[in-house]
Every structure is written in structure tokens, then in C-alpha cells.
Amino acid sequence: MADRNGFFDLSKTALTRRTALKGLAAGAGLTVAPGFVRYSQAQSSAPIKIGFQSHRTGIGAAYGRWYEKTTAAAVKAINAAGGINGRQVEVIIEDDGTDPGRGAEVVGKFATQHKTDIVFGTLFSHVVIGSAPAAGENKMPYFVVSEGHHVASTKLNRYVFQPGITDVKSQIQSMAPWIAANAGKKVTQIFPDFAFGYDHRDYLPPALKAQGAEVIAQIAIPPTESSFTKYFPQIPAETEVIYHVMVGPAVLTFVKELGEFYGSNRPQLFGFIDSLEATDINSPGLEFLDGSHFWEGSPRYAQADDSEAQKAYRAAVGIDDNGAAVGDPKDVSTAAHMFGCWETLYVVKKAMEDAGYKGPEDRAKLVEATEALTAFAEGPEHPQGPKTFNGKIHQCFGIQNISKVEGGKLKVVHKTKIEDGLYEAEGDYTTQAL
Amino acid sequence: MSEASPAKAYTLHLGVIALLFVLSFLLPEYYHGLLARIMVLAVFAMGYNMLFGYVGLLSLGHAMFFAAGLYGAGLAVIQLGWNVPLAFLGGIACGAVLALGIGLLALRTTGVAFMIVTMMFAQVFYLLILYFATWTGGDQGMVVPQPARVLSFGATALELTNPTVRYMTALALFSIVLLVTLAIVRSRYGRVLVAIRENEERTKMLGYDTFSNKLAAVVISGTICAASGAAYALLFGYVGSSFASVQYSILPLLWVLLGGAATTLGPLIGTLFMYYVIDITSGYTSAYLLIVGIALILLVLFFPKGILGSVRQRWLGWLP
């Protein structure tokens, strides 16, 4: 194609069949050449990057620390078993300060700077809600472990999922049959006067009513309150069960003052362990809780009938039979929630494998593959128990535990059924555009 | 402080705006998004600076004005279905009305009492947001739906979720507020405010109604902060009570102190500085707030008037 003077002549570039075949052969040869092979492998074996939005500081720090430990254990197990689609998993952590404003920035940072494949791991509801718009705008699959009802409410967007932990509406609903049958029919609720308390205020009464029991009083305590004695006279005398969900440092004072108010003659007590996550149940002042019952997502204390999967999970995360860090009995875990990190990562693995996920260009496929999931069997990947998944509302539903405080430990006395916590879907994310 | 010629002052400010415009095309994706957020929050700091820097009134309650704009605009979209421009104006109006009411009451006090009264009002505002959780979303907050965050001009629709549109909208707001602030501080009214800051009694003796002037400053300051809050809700899509907490009253104070109180560009510099220190240090340690604290102490020790305040004092006396 060069003229006689050695210059390239475009007028003489018509391809002959022979030339074309030569070119094709050369191209094919290049693709199998050693250099190209190395390049292909570098592309396909690059790690899958998971952005972990962690509450390292702020009000959620105790949860954040244990969420990180559980995540590290799950990633280690996944990588040891060959990773996801043959690729190792790499976790990149950013602290959101348990602040919704910073949370949104962190999601943006994962999407545009770290260029992670997904964002994962957020617990506090206000951070999830604050970060969700950034996830939607960046078309970034956002897998939260929050237990809030916000995902299932379908008020967020198509990129937000909660496949590893049951939401609070379902948890509350599934407690009602046991409370009505075993604790009492007349229930007084004491809850903090903000959103976490409102979930219980709104969802418990209809659930109890369906079981032939009733809420006879609801006592909302302002979040700024540090002493509770003045509220206790509002508890009706005929109360058979006090349902309490106080959270934060005030819970110790709350329990102590409740004990002083009732002495030894008290109604049944039922609470959510959220109040006492990362807190030793044998802390001074909590003696009054002996004999009372708690909801637990996953049991803090090792149980006699723990499955092999549960035992393996506890060993991998590094918690002892009392639910504290191995080697540090004072470092009590957030066992009731943190299993959600482990299980969510296995859901991500499954969805990525189903989608044939290769990189950020396949994020929409990952969303659709996650929505197509329907159930997770109990086992090493789901040690808390079996779950169903509703792809329309991006929410999973699992069994719940009711535990009794006995001899300074929490013993599981009842496991709910998945059906106890099911409710009508409030919307459908799959109708939203990707 | 020597006086800058109008041309010099406006050239500098227009230059800063031009620089921010050019940066839109040069910055990597992440910093592009971050700078949009910083410009919106710098407007909040400029509103704070108007009262703190130029009138000398230290408020610890400005989060309520930001939140008034945030909720005013956000709720207008979520609950009333208003379009973006109307909701933005609604947010600003909420802030202006609130600032007028708070100003009328809080300006009966001065000094530490003013600080405490504004903080208490902000706390009331914050608790009201929690109390009316049915409408405000309480402590969890609410999402402003993505489909509603669209600016429509006839057949043309600009999605505020688009990074370029968001950056340019933030820049437009920042530029307008910056130039308005500059015009105010260079005006006769601006000089009266500085006179009040320097010696209120003497200003009164010269025949000025200091109460009315201060009240106007509170309203202007609150309105600017509300504009920032309204823009935040519409551009970033989240309305939450944490923005009404005391933390968000202290943040603009820090941004202004860092950048230089009573300098028009100081709030931008301070907000930029804080954001980048947090963003960079948090990548290395979870004790990043300790580093931020040390940085603040060093700045106060070596640049007591803030970055631009010190620059003005030492080298560029004409900086407005």
C-alpha cells in the first residue's frame, strides 16, 4: 500500500480477500498471545470493590465497630472460598459520622472517587434515608443493614435494598402472637418520642388487636429526658405487660428507676434488645430485668440447639458463648443485628453471580438479579435462619427470637415463623426506571 | 483597613466566580460534586457572616434558619407538590418570616444572652420538627423524590440530579449571594452595621436606629441561610432534623472564623478548608476530628482573624 517513493497511498488501500484473512489471522493470534492473556486476566481478576459506609464515629460507633468485624469475617470467608465470580472482594471503608449529610457525601465518594461496585452496611435510619438519594442519582446499588421500615415502605428508590435483616415493622408484628399468648393481654408501651419509638407506637397496637390483646396506654418519653420516675404513675394499674424500647445511655437509668417504682411486684416486661446492644446484661442496675423477655434478631448468647452454621459464624466473627469478643468479655457485641452484614454480603454474592456481574456497567443487571431472588435457605451463608425476599419492596423476612433473661444470660424461649411477620406490600420498586 | 475601589473589589469577586465556573470543567467527578455542596453550604456561612462578622452578633441558633429553608422547600415539594422554583421561594420566605420573628424577640438581648436566646429558639425549632414527625419525618427525615427535582423552562427540563446542572445551580446561588453581600457591606447600610459592631452606643448617639438596622441584618442573614437550606433540599434531595441540630449552628460559626469573619470571601475559604481537612484526614484515621481540632487551634493561634482576615491585616488591607 506504499507507493514507489515509500509513502503511504490511501488510494491503494482496497482490501483483497487474502489481505483480510491475513489481518484476521494476525488479530486472532494477538488475542491468544501471552501479553494479551495477562491483560484479560488483569481485567477479570480485579477485585470487586465494596464501599462500606461505616458508623465509625458518632452515636452509631458501637454498632459500626461490630459491623466492621462481621463484614471483615464474611469477606474473609467469601475470598477463601474463591470470591465472587472468581474475583476477590475488597472492602473500602469510609466513616459517615452517623450523620445523614456526611452519609450522602460518602456514597458520592464511593461512586465517583473509589468507583466501588456497590455501597453497603449502613445501620442508622436517618443516614440511610439521607444517603438514598445519592445512591439513586449515582445508580449505585446500596445494600443497607438497618432494620428500619424505610426500604420496605418504598419511599426510597430502586437502588436501595435490605436483604439481610428483617425490618422493624415485621419484627414488631411477629412479636404480637407470643406476647398475647404468654405475657398478657393488656399492654402499656413506653417508648422514646422519636422515629424509632414511633415504629413501635404505630405497628404494635394493630398487631396485638389481631391477637385479641390491646395496648391500653402509650407513654412517649422525650429524647432529652434523663429521669423517668415521673412517667411511671401514668402506667395503668391493670397493665399486664410493659413493652419498653428505650434506647441510648438512658436505658440503664430507666430500668433502675422502673425497678425502684415496682419493687418485686411488677407486670411482665417485654423489650427490644436494641436498648442493650453492646451493653452487658449484667451491668449494675439491670438486675430488675431478670425474668423479663426481649426480642433478638440473632441470639447474643450461644444456645444449646445452635446449628453448625451458627457456631461457625460465631467463631468466624470472633464472639464467645456470651456474645462478647473472644478474649475481651467486656467488649459485648451487637449480635442481634450484625449478622445482617454477613448475610447481606452473601446475598450480594448470589445476585452478582446470577447477573454475571463484571463491573459497574452491570449495576442495573445486579439490581434486577437481586429483585429476582425469593428465598435464602438457612446454612453457612444465612446462619440466623431461613428468609424470604420480596423483590418488589427490596426487603427480606426472617424468623425472630424471643429470649428470657435467666441467671444473667439471654435464653431463647421462642422462635417466630416467617409468616408471622409478613404484611401487604406498600408499593413496588420494580416499576421505577433503572 | 483601606477602601478598595469598586472596580478592584468586583473584579476580585467576579474572578472568584469565574474560577469556580472554570473548575466545573477541570475537577475530577468526586471533587466536582463536593464543590457543589460546599458552595451551597458556603452560602449558609455567608448568611451567618452577615450577622456575626459585620454586626458582631454571635448567634448559636442559625441552624433554624437553614432548616426553615430546608423544610420550607422540601415540604412544599413533598406535601404540597409545588414545583422547584416555587418551593425554593417558599423556603426562602419561611426563613425570612422566622428571622423577623426571632429577631424581634432575640434582639432585646445582647452578647452572651443573645447567644443563649438564639440557641434556645433553635432548640425549640429542632424539637418541633421531632414533635410534628407525621409531617416532617421526625429524626429520620424525608427524601425529596427524584422526579420532582426538575427545573422546567417551557419544553426544556433540567434535572437537578444531573451533576453539571447541580453545580451550575449551586454556583448561580453562590454568585448571587456573594455579589449581594459585597454590595451590602460596601453600602451605607453596611457601614452602619460595622459601626454598630464597633460601638453601638456611639452609633445611636449619631442618630441611627440601631434596633431596626440590626433587625434588618437578622432578616437578611436568616433569609440567606434559608436560601442555602432550600437549595440543599432541592439539589441533594434530603430533608432531615440533624440539619436543625446545634451542630449545624456551630458549623457556620467555625467556617466563618476559619475563613475570616467580616470578609466576603472568608466563608467560602473556611467551608472549603473544613470540608477538605475532614475529607482527607478521615481517610487515614477515625480520630479525624482530633486533627480538625488541632488545625483549628493552630489557626486561632497563628491566624486569629481567620485565613482571609489575617491576609487582609498583613498584606491586602483593601479586601472587603
Image: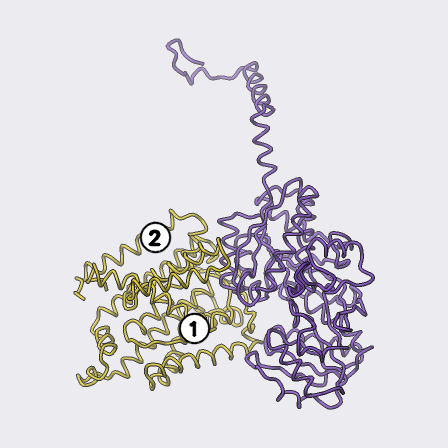
Chain colours: A purple, B yellow
Nearer to us in this view, A323 or B76: A323
> Quick check: do tags 1 and 2 share a chain?
yes
- Few, some or many residues within 10 Å of mark 1 (<14, 14–19, 20+): many
SS for dot 2: helix
- Give the image location of residue A309, x and y in percent: 77, 54
Indicate left or right for A136 with B312 as reference.
right
Location of residue B238 with respect to B16 vertically, above or below: below
Q: Amino acid at mark 2?
A: Phe
Quadrant the N terminus of chain B occupies = bottom left
Q: Chain of mark 2?
A: B
Q: Which residue is mark 2?
A: B21
A3 is higher (above) or lower (below) than A76: above
Q: How many residues crowd mark 2 within 10 Å: few (<14), some (14–19), many (20+)? A: some
Q: Nearer the viewer, residue A96 or A8?
A: A96
On the rendered structure, is A125 left or right of A205? left
Going from the N terminus, do you reach mark 1 or mark 2 first? Answer: 2
The quarter holding residue B313 reads: bottom left
In the rendered image, which quarter contains the C terminus of chain B? bottom left
The residue identified by callout 1 is B63
Which of discs 1 and 2 lies nearer the camera? The answer is: 1
Is residue A394 visible in the rendered image? The answer is: no
**Tag 1 subunit:** B
Tell me the CA gap for discs 1 and 2. Answer: 28 Å
- Horizontal and vertical percent position of residue A353: 68, 44
Count of all numbered marks drawn on residues in the image: 2
Q: Nearer the viewer, residue B69 or A50?
A: A50
Work out whether A81 lies above or below A244: above
Amino acid tagged 1? Ala
Determine whether the residue tagged by mark 1 lies in a helix, strand or loop: helix
A351 vs B284, nearest the viewer:
B284
